[in-house]
Amino acid sequence: MKNTLFAIATAAAFASPAVAGGPGFGIALFDEMIPVFGPGILDFSTPGIGDFYADMGMTISSTESLYLGNGVSQGDSGNFDIEGTQGPAFLSLFSPAAGGTVTFTFDGPVNFLIDLIVTQQGGTEDVICTVTTLNDGVIVDTEILTLPNPAGDPDGQAIFRQWNNADTFHFQLAPNSNRILAFDYIEWQHLSCGIADLNNDGSLNFLDVSAYLAEYGQGCN
């Protein structure tokens, strides 16, 4: 145990400024998926699709197949009339998936920012979506979003939303919501640095070294 603690403390003491400054970030634009899968309908239960961002700590699952769109500027495959905000691509629940659920799961608690895009395509009524966040299987928050139809905006209207301190995020369309709901620009901030973060404050710094020295002095084994 002492050798393990020494290695942890050494790593914390000599961590690069980028690591020592705080927990890590991840960003998914979905543009990264277009060269691999091309635009079109994707089954997110297929290996390699839902875990495309797994090396960054995020996996995606859905009760329905999702549409990977390439945006208006890149040909608008599927005629969704949507352009992503940070790049043309987006991921979408579309009209056949009324009541469908998309789940974003992380390997630890995160602060989660997402751009939800709604468009005129698919009808004139609002999009109604229930968002449920969980941390370690316990519900943190439940919110019903009503996303208004963006009349006269053919590229879709972006609505940024953020939820904090959860590891699972469910987005479920209301059964009578037959509109398109697109996901774009997902950003997350990990709130844990792993076993090297001895005092669990989300950062690797001299306080972790102090925690190590305290345990070492107590003869922890």
Image (spheres, rainbow, N blue to C red):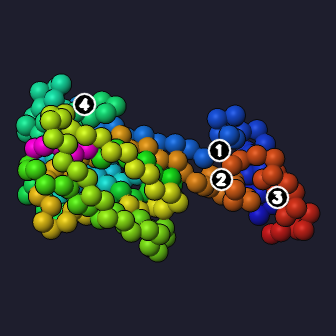
C-alpha gap between disc 1 and disc 4: 31 Å
Q: Which residue is mark 3?
A: 211
- The residue lying at 36 percent from left, 40 percent from top is 185
State the image quarter where residue 169 is shown: bottom left
Check disc 3 and give the amino acid type.
Answer: Ala
C-alpha gap between disc 1 and disc 2: 6 Å
Q: Is residue 187 left or right of residue 31?
A: right
Q: Is residue 34 left or right of residue 106?
A: left
Q: Which residue is mark 1?
A: 22
The furthest residue to the top: 73
- The residue lying at 77 percent from left, 57 percent from top is 5
**Of callouts 3 and 2, the N-terminal one:** 2
The answer to the question of whether label 1 and label 4 lie on touching residues, with beta carbons closer than 8 A, is: no
Mark 4 crowdedness (10 Å alpha carbons): few <14, some 14-19, many ≥20: many
Q: Which residue is mark 2?
A: 202
Q: Is residue 169 left or right of residue 92?
A: right
The answer to the question of whether label 1 and label 2 lie on touching residues, with beta carbons closer than 8 A, is: yes
**Of callouts 1 and 2, the N-terminal one:** 1
Give coordinates of residue 195: x percent, y percent: 66, 57
C-alpha gap between disc 1 and disc 3: 17 Å
The answer to which of 209 and 137 lies nearer the viewer is 137
C-alpha gap between disc 3 and disc 2: 14 Å
| Between marks 2 and 4 in the image, the one whose residue lies nearer the viewer | 4
- The residue lying at 30 percent from left, 41 percent from top is 158
Check disc 4 and give the amino acid type.
Answer: Pro
